[in-house]
Each structure stands twice: as structure tokens, then as C-alpha cells.
Image (cartoon, rainbow, N blue to C red):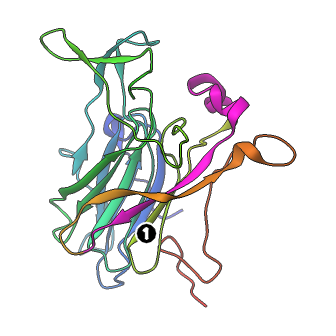
Amino acid sequence: MKQIIDLGNTGLLPLEIRFLHDPSKDTGYVGSALSSNMIRFFRNSDDTWSHEASVVVISVEPLKVENWILPEMPGLITDFLISLDDRFFYFVNWLHGDIRQYNIEDPKNPVLTGQIWVGGLLQKGSPVKAVREDGTTYQFDVPQIKGKSLRAGPQMIQLSLDGKRLYATNSLFSAWDRQFYPELMDKGSHIIQIDVDTEKGGLSINPDFFVDFGEEPDGPALAHEMRYPGGDCTSDIWI
């Protein structure tokens, strides 16, 4: 072991780590699920590695809620990835239910360019509601796809090599699925496609793509990871 980087309380439950694809750029990000922070790390001139301990590049604030197990709900960043051209990164908030796109042409200062709700505990019709500072409550609009309601929250994502199609599943870990989204046990999970504006930024749900694992011959299944056979944005090997 060469070095340990202690992320402290800003980096609780780090699930994913990604480097920029450009080999000349010695920097990357780590997503801390429980803290719901994106943290940048980088190599120093003496070949040691550091992270920005005093500031996180992105912080998803917990939402005040009612009818839930806690008074505040973290976003729970469970996955993120970087486009092959290193212009954008994408991450999901499994509990809040949104997918975000950020421009990272300046890696120190990501800019939000797209956000879309595709599930989560705060979608309309859920017993859980977010609470504003004035005490009023709100929920998020989540559209149906091919007449099917979107279940659970976005969990694992994968991006096409051209950066124009972002795919998302919704199963994290069966024990956690059962606790936070018990309907997945009965109805199974699904894959959806998000169309990406790679010029100006922006996300939109593709209304014609919906893979439903609730209709498998042997019963509902839980979909997690996705891979392209010839390589993808989270791979270092291409055929």
C-alpha cells in the first residue's frame, strides 16, 4: 500500500471512484453515498495524492421530510460516471430520485447542466413528502414510460460511447431494496434510457425505451450493473 487518503465526515460511505479519461490529467472524483458529496482528488508535484478537504465540489443537501424513518433524507449518491471526452459527469440520488449532469471542463468547479427525476421516495403519490422552510410540503413529478410507473430510484448508470444515451437501473442491494423500496421485491426493477444533450447540456426521458424485469419468466428480477461488450465509459479497455 502506497498511500491512504482519509475523506473524513465529508466522505462517508464512498462507493465509486473515477478518474478523468485523459491520461495527462491526474485528477478524479469519489462519490460518497451517505454524505452525498462529490469529492475531487488529484496528484501533487511530489507524486503524493490529496483531496480538497475543506471544500467538496458538489454537495447534495439532505431534504427535510415527513412520514419517513428520519427527519431528513440524504440524496444517497450510489453511482456516477464521466463521459469519454471528460466534459460531463453524471450521478444519481437513489433516495431523492434524480439524475444530474454537470459540466466539468473546469474540474474544480462543476456546473449543473441537467437534472431529471425518474423515481425516488419523493415522487407524487408517495406517502413521503419533502418539507419547505415555511412548513409546506412538495413532491416531484415522475412521468410514466409506456404506461408503466417508475419504481424505486435511479441506481447504476451507464453512458454510450458517443455520450448521447444514458441508461439507468434501480436496484442497489436486495436487503436495501427490501427496506427502502419493497415494491421491487414484487414488481422487479427496470432499465430506462435518458437522452443527453451533449452540446448545451440537458437530460430528457426517452419515452420509447423501457426494459421491465418484473415480467421475467421465472418471476421479478433485480437489475443492477450494465456493460457494453466492446467497452464503455467506465472501462479502460476497448475492442
Relative to 233, is 189 on the left or the right? right
Compared with 211, 107 (above or below) is: below
Extreme residue in the front direction = 147
Going 44% across and 13% down the picture, which residue do you hit? 68
Left-right relation of 198 to 79: left
Q: Is residue 212 left or right of residue 71?
A: right
Can you name the residue that lies furthest to the left here?
134
Does the segment drawn in magenta span residue 39? no
The amino acid sitting under disc 1 is Arg
Image quadrant containing the N terminus: bottom right
Q: How many marks?
A: 1
Q: Secondary structure at mark 1?
A: strand
Q: Determine the image quadrant of residue 161.
A: bottom left
Look at the image and give the residue range highlighted in magenta.
175-198
Residue placed most toward the observer, 195 or 3: 195
Q: Quadrant of the C terminus?
A: bottom right
Residue 32 shows in this picture: no
Give the side of residue 68 with respect to residue 20, left or right.
Answer: right
Residue at image point 32% right, 47% down: 116
Crowd class of label 1 (few under 14; some 14 to 19; many from 20; radius 10 Å):
some
Instruction: Please provide percent x and percent y for residue 205.
Output: 39, 55
- Badge 1 is on which residue? 165
Residue 237 x/y as whole percent: 57, 84
Residue 96 locus on image (x, y percent): 38, 33
Q: Residue furthest right?
A: 218
Residue plotted at (48% across, 38% down): 153
What residue appears at the point 62 percent right and 32 percent down from the top-left corner? 177
